[in-house]
Image (cartoon, helix red, strand yellow):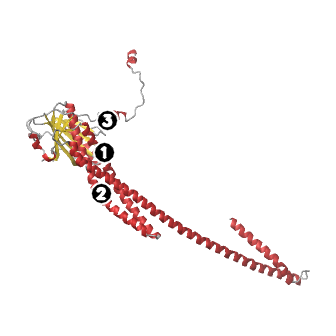
Amino acid sequence: MEGTSENRSALPSFRTSALRDKVLGEVHARPFRPLGTPRTVLHYAFLTSAEEAAVDQAWFSEFCISHGNNGPTEGARHHTLAFGGGKLSWEQHAEFTTYTWDGAASADALFAPVSHSHPFGAAFKAPGDLLVAARLELCAPTENEDWRRQFDAGSLCVSDLEEGKAMVATDFRQDGDGLTRFLVFNRSLSEVQLGAVVQRLIEIETYRTLAMLGLFEATALQPEIRKFEIELAELTGKMKATAALGDNQDLLHELSGLAAALEAGATASTFRFGASRAYDEIVKARIATLQEVAAPGELSMSSFLSRRLAPAMRTCQAIEDRQAMLSRKLARATTLLRTRVDVELEQQNRSLLESMDRRAHLQLRLQQTVEGLSVAAVSYYVVGLIAYLAKAAKEAGLPVPEPGITAGLSVPVVILVIWGVVRRIRRKHGEN
């Protein structure tokens, strides 16, 4: 018991976040693969939807099991297994899935036919549409310049990496197998360092291709945005000439439809442009990490890529800016037109209220006239009744004045009483 208490840590234990292990493990999730020379690396990236990614993970799990290995755990996004004398890595990203395999290479010939031990044969099932395909040859440095014949001289890039400890050559073109070729001469890098260099070259090829997808989205949107700009100019021109409420309401309806169409297009392209910016930043970061410097008399990868990648990113940004500017202009035009419509409606409502007020005054005058006539009519009948009562009383021998005198004397009294009753009734209804 004493030994157990001595071995027990004196530090307290705390409730651990469910994400702690995932966050700490993410740093070690994709370790660099140690690579020696000579070596061949094949890398493929496929565009995949969520459904395609789920199907691919199930297939890859069965593939691993069929070769005597454990498949990726549930929810895992990367896995590596030994295959064909090398290693096969599978990795899923937000919109694409990659497969990378390295195997033995010929020490006598560069870019010789790959042995049939690679996994991308007839049994391989592509998870989606192929976007990136690259082949990297790792070899020892040589004084022979025959390797240049493997590339297009017009776009050949040759760079020193890691302070001259390695050299890479590529032309960013497809060979007969549809693969982009990279030739890496290892001068003094360790296997781990060489693996890191290869991983970064693969990421540069993958992400520079994905970044370019935004350019084609921008190119496709340009005619539509131009159409919106023309329609907006026409509608704002009509706003100057229209004054009727109906015409303004029609213009407001057209502006609202145009704004909805613009926002739909902008929303659909937001992900693509945002992803392209992120991929472009990754490419720049990977090139900076490689400490790339153009070999004497050669073109560097960063210089070659910046000639086309940078303008493509500026095009995407320009389209986003035009969309934002159009959205602001449409919002201002819609607000202005809606204000005009509201003012016209308020004027109509004011005119209607003034008309109703005049009718109310006329009705009041008419009501007062009718009340006056009704007082006279009721008083006439009441005085007539009083006259009949006085006549009857006179004939009955009662001591009353003449009926005519009685009726005449009762007229002022009857009118005042009837007028008071009518006024009281009107006041009572007014309070209710």
- Residue 71 visible in this rendered orientation of the protein: no
Q: What residue is drawn where x is 50% and y is 64%? A: 342
Residue to which mark 1 is pinned: 278
- Of residues 246 and 78, which is closer to you in this image? 246
- Disc 2 marks a residue whose amino acid type is Leu
- Quarter holding the N terminus is top left
| Residue 35: percent from left, percent from top | 18, 33
Q: Earlier in the sequence, mark 1 or mark 2?
A: 2
Q: Which label sits in the foreground, 2 or 3?
A: 2
Of tags 3 and 1, the one toward the viewer is: 1
Q: Is residue 151 left or right of residue 233?
A: left
> Which residue, given by chain and number where applicable, does mark 3 sit on?
26
- Using the rendered image of the protein, determine whether residue 132 is visible from the camera's viewpoint: yes
Q: Residue at x 46, y 71 (%)?
A: 244
- Judged left or right of residue 206, residue 389 is right
Please provide percent x and percent y for residue 180. Answer: 17, 45
Q: Earlier in the sequence, mark 3 or mark 1?
A: 3
- In the displayed structure, 139 sits above or below 350; it is above
Label 1 element class: helix
> Which kind of residue does numbered mark 3 sit on?
Glu
List the residue tagged with mark 2: 221
Judge by depth and name the residue closer to the eye, 223 or 129: 223
